[in-house]
Amino acid sequence: MRQRALSAAIFVPPLLVVLAIGEPWFGALIAVFVAVAAREAARLVRGAGYPAIVVLAVAGALAVAADVASPEPLRPYADLLVAATLIAAGVAAFVEKDTRVGFAAWIGTAFTAVYVGMLGSLVRLGEIAPPLASSAPAAQLGAGRGWILLIILLVWSFDTGAYGVGIALGKRKFLAHISPSKSYWGLFGGVTASTAVAVAGLWALGQPAVLGLALGPLTGLAAQAGDLAESMLKRAAGAKDSGGLIPGHGGILDRVDSFIFAAPVAALFVTALVR
């Protein structure tokens, strides 16, 4: 958890800079993250015994991300692109002499594509964000930037709160078979921090602050689940990090794993409850 909190200081600032510049650069940055993270995830999946086809896993993840992020007029084409990459993965697996290995390759490739491709929800969130009232304190940010920034800060605050409280009070561990550093007090500290940020952030966006009492825990717990999911994959593969792209801090997947789960939850929250 200490590594996650410290690496946020490396990962988040460039993300905020590109977010400030806006589209299409933010979408392009997410596409780069998806491609690199999918390559790393495919290697982990292979290490776990599922011989994913790396090239098709990367292509499939980009297709899924584009499908998740695409506006309604482009959605049918994006759906077909996802279908095409998943079909290609199945056909490519035909060359395996052992059908069990071929089937495992198809499953591993499809899993990697869908898993990492969910990161496209960050871009989608900016597209579905409701307009900000002119009286909202953060009105100058704009709806898309404001909501994406809020989710970035929610994940960051969860990691930081979990690390700080976990270090101070975290004696009792949970799910230690997946991640030995996790503790119940750390979970409490993370959820408390993300809830506080959600309440303040929704107020700044001109939304009822009380909704933060739901958005904060939901996003925080989703971020924790994303972290644990990648930890489970790394343990299955016998790997410490997803890659070595960031010296001392692992790979891109290690930095975006929380967002892979948190961004879709936040997008669903906005779609269902925010007007």
Image (cartoon, rainbow, N blue to C red):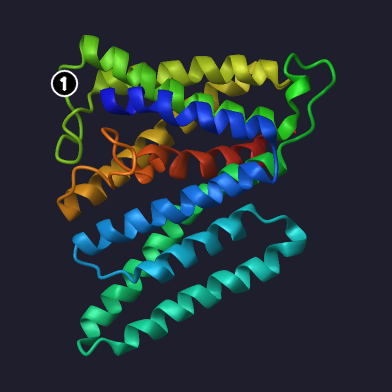
- Placement of 8 over or under 45, stated as above or below: above
Provide residue 153's location: percent of width, then percent of height. Answer: 52, 24
Provide residue 8's location: percent of width, then percent of height. Answer: 41, 27
Residue 185 is at least partly visible in this image: yes
Question: Is 96 placed left or right of 27 in the picture?
Answer: left
Q: Residue furthest right?
A: 134
Residue appearing at x 30%, y 89% in the figure:
95
Residue appearing at x 48%, y 66% in the figure:
60
Residue appearing at x 61%, y 35% in the figure:
18
Q: Which residue is mark 1?
A: 172
For the image, the number of numbered tags is 1
Q: Nearer the viewer, residue 257 or 39?
A: 39
- Placement of 97 over or under 155, stated as above or below: below
Question: Is 272 placed left or right of 157 in the picture?
Answer: right
Q: Nearer the viewer, residue 127 or 46?
A: 46
Disc 1 is placed on an element classified as: loop
- Identity, as a three-letter code, of the amino acid under mark 1: Arg
User: Quadrant of the image for the N terminus?
Assistant: top left
Question: Is 8 placed left or right of 46 in the picture?
Answer: right
Question: Is 213 placed left or right of 55 in the picture?
Answer: right
User: Quadrant of the image for the C terminus?
Assistant: top right
Residue 1 is at least partly visible in this image: no
Which of the 4 quarters of the picture holds residue 99?
Answer: bottom left
Provide residue 266's location: percent of width, then percent of height. Answer: 56, 37
Residue appearing at x 77%, y 62% in the figure:
73
